[in-house]
């Protein structure tokens, strides 16, 4: 059968040093509800943001800079139509560097790192949509993400970018497939446990998969978390499958796994000093004790006019408790954590995306990947620590990266309330080499002034 993929034929060579420089289709996404909000949110960008973005995209030191246009990246015209309809005018650095390497033949593995909010999703979605042979209705590109929320968001991007292609995409997330049904789609977006389950039940045939993408790859390979399931998925992939790993962070302890997972990969890496996003101003507030944190939070929200914000806590019960307290005080707030059922999580996320709800309180379950451009404040109510209680700079970066998306500005505020939490924050600050500035809790006028300036 003729190959009807959207790959440019014979256009690229593999060369790491080259880095310098319809009617839509099947919306059958396993009948799960998806939000309309993401469709609109990239299309309406305020004038100020546009000006700032144009400046950044012209600045060679910015991660949003590129010398090329999307037209130069060898993408099929049907994909370019999708990209331009999303109002993407120029690629970011990671898109410009990664796409030619990802699309080159023979396919080569990729380990790609770029700051939060710099457009990694488009890089791998365009690769998936380019590699698929649309004449064959079988899973050929599989993308794994750490949460159903992120899988749903990636699906939205697949459907928008693939609007002028005949792509059919389906979910492999919990409850997405009725009993006895099978995945018949070109592109599959899922979470690793459910993919393993579907393969075991023969609902997902992995034999024609050409491309496996791990979004948030360091998280997906974490040996104390999803690593086991992700490896099981890898083990059923065909021999010549291309492995593509993307994240904003690749901590040292997962590097040996990433290199083993994706051998001989083209690698695009960041230096430690490049990890933080310049547009996100970082603050902390020194609270007297853990009860005082709740008071400071209330005070903060009664004083500030915040666009949308996410509050991160360590424990699910804290999320519920604070949500109840703030609801009583009249704030439109919802909580989301991993113990809730899928439909409940989807509802919360959709309401938040639409902007109906302004404040979302959550655990690390959505610390990564979630892209809501209106979020301009992230609060670390609890400083992020890993499974062993040690300060966790990677999770910190991902959490604060929920704001300051693609050149936008935002603020993050850390709550500390004792020596231990202060030391944890300081350890994160030192690890990332960033400045976290104090905002007083005893002078609200001053606090208001500082934060208002940052949130402008
Ligand atoms: N070339 C572009 N021009 C304009 N906007 C873009 C471009 N590429 C991506 N975006 C937008 O930038 C935002 C961030 O992109 P994306 O979610 O892919 O970031 P990311 O690098 O995956 O971040 P994270 O590490 O947090 O997952 C999205 O809203 C996306 O639509």
Image: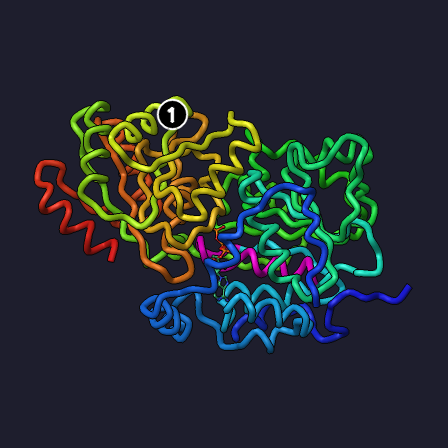
Name the residue: 79% across, 52% down: 240
Say which residue appears at 33% left-offset and 37% top-offset: 332
Q: Which residue is mark 1?
A: 320
Where is residue 314 shown, x and y percent of the image?
38, 28
Q: Is residue 349 above or below residue 337?
A: below
Note whether 152 is above or below 53 in the view shown: above
Residue 229 seen from this side: no
Question: Is residue 431 left or right of 147 when viewed as pictured?
Answer: left
**How far across and down, in percent of the image, does residue 307 sit?**
31, 50
- Helix, strand or loop status at disc 1: helix
> Along the line of sight, which residue is nearer the eye, 155 or 442?
155
Q: Is residue 275 above or below residue 302?
A: below
- The quarter of the rendered structure image containing the C terminus is bottom left
Q: Residue 220 location, x and y as percent?
A: 58, 39
Residue at image x 34%, y 44%?
Answer: 309
Region rendered in magenta? 113-129
* Residue that appears at 17% across and 43% down: 303
Q: Is residue 264 above or below residue 70?
A: above
Work out which quarter of the rendered image holds the N terminus and state it.
bottom right
Examine the structure image and report whether residue 125 is included in the region drawn in magenta: yes
Residue 31 placement (x, y as % from top left):
67, 42
The 10 Å Cα crowd at callout 1, few under 14, some 14 to 19, many 20 or more, is some
Task: Judge by depth and name the residue closer to the eye, 135 or 57.
Answer: 135
| Mark 1 beta carbon near ligand 1 (under 8 Å) | no
């Amino acid at each position: 059968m003729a190959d009807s993929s959207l790959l440019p034929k014979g256009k690229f060579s593999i060369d790491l040093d080259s880095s310098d420089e319809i009617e839509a289709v099947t919306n059958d996404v396993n009948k799960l509800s998806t939000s309309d909000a993401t469709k609109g949110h990239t299309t309406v960008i305020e004038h100020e943001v546009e000006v700032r973005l144009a400046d950044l995209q012209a600045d060679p030191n910015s991660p949003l800079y590129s010398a090329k246009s999307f037209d130069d990246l060898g993408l099929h015209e049907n994909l370019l139509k999708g990209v331009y309809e999303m109002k993407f005018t120029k690629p970011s650095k990671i898109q410009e560097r990664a796409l030619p390497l990802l699309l080159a033949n023979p396919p080569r593995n990729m380990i790609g790192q770029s700051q939060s909010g710099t457009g990694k999703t488009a890089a791998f979605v365009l690769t998936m949509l380019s590699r698929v042979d649309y004449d064959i209705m079988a899973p050929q590109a599989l993308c794994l993400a750490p949460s159903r929320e992120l899988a749903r968001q990636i699906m939205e991007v697949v459907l928008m970018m693939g609007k002028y292609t005949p792509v059919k995409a389906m979910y492999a997330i919990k409850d997405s497939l009725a009993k006895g049904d099978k995945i018949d789609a070109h592109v599959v977006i899922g979470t690793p446990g459910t993919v393993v389950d579907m393969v075991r039940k023969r609902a997902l045939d992995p034999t024609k998969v050409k491309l496996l993408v791990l979004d948030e790859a360091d998280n997906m390979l974490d040996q104390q978390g999803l690593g086991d399931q992700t490896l099981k998925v890898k083990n059923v992939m065909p021999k010549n499958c291309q492995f593509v790993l993307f994240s904003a962070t690749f901590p040292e302890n997962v590097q040996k796994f990433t290199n083993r997972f994706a051998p001989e990969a083209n690698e695009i890496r960041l230096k430690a000093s490049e990890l933080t996003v310049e547009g996100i101003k970082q603050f902390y507030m020194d609270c007297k004790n853990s009860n005082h944190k709740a008071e400071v939070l209330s005070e903060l929200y009664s004083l500030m006019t915040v666009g949308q914000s996410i509050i991160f806590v360590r424990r699910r019960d804290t999320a519920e408790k604070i949500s109840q307290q703030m609801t009583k005080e009249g704030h439109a707030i919802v909580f989301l954590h991993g113990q809730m059922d899928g439909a409940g999580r989807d509802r919360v996320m959709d309401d938040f995306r639409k902007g109906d709800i302004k404040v979302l309180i959550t655990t690390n379950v959505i610390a990564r990947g979630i892209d809501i451009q209106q979020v301009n404040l992230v609060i670390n109510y609890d400083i992020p620590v890993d499974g062993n209680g040690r300060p966790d700079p990677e999770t910190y970066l991902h959490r604060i990266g929920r704001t300051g998306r693609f050149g936008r500005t935002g603020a993050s505020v850390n709550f500390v309330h004792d020596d231990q939490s202060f030391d944890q924050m300081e350890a994160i600050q030192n690890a990332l080499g960033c400045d976290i500035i104090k905002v007083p809790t005893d002078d609200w006028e001053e606090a208001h002034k500082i934060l208002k300036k940052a949130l402008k």
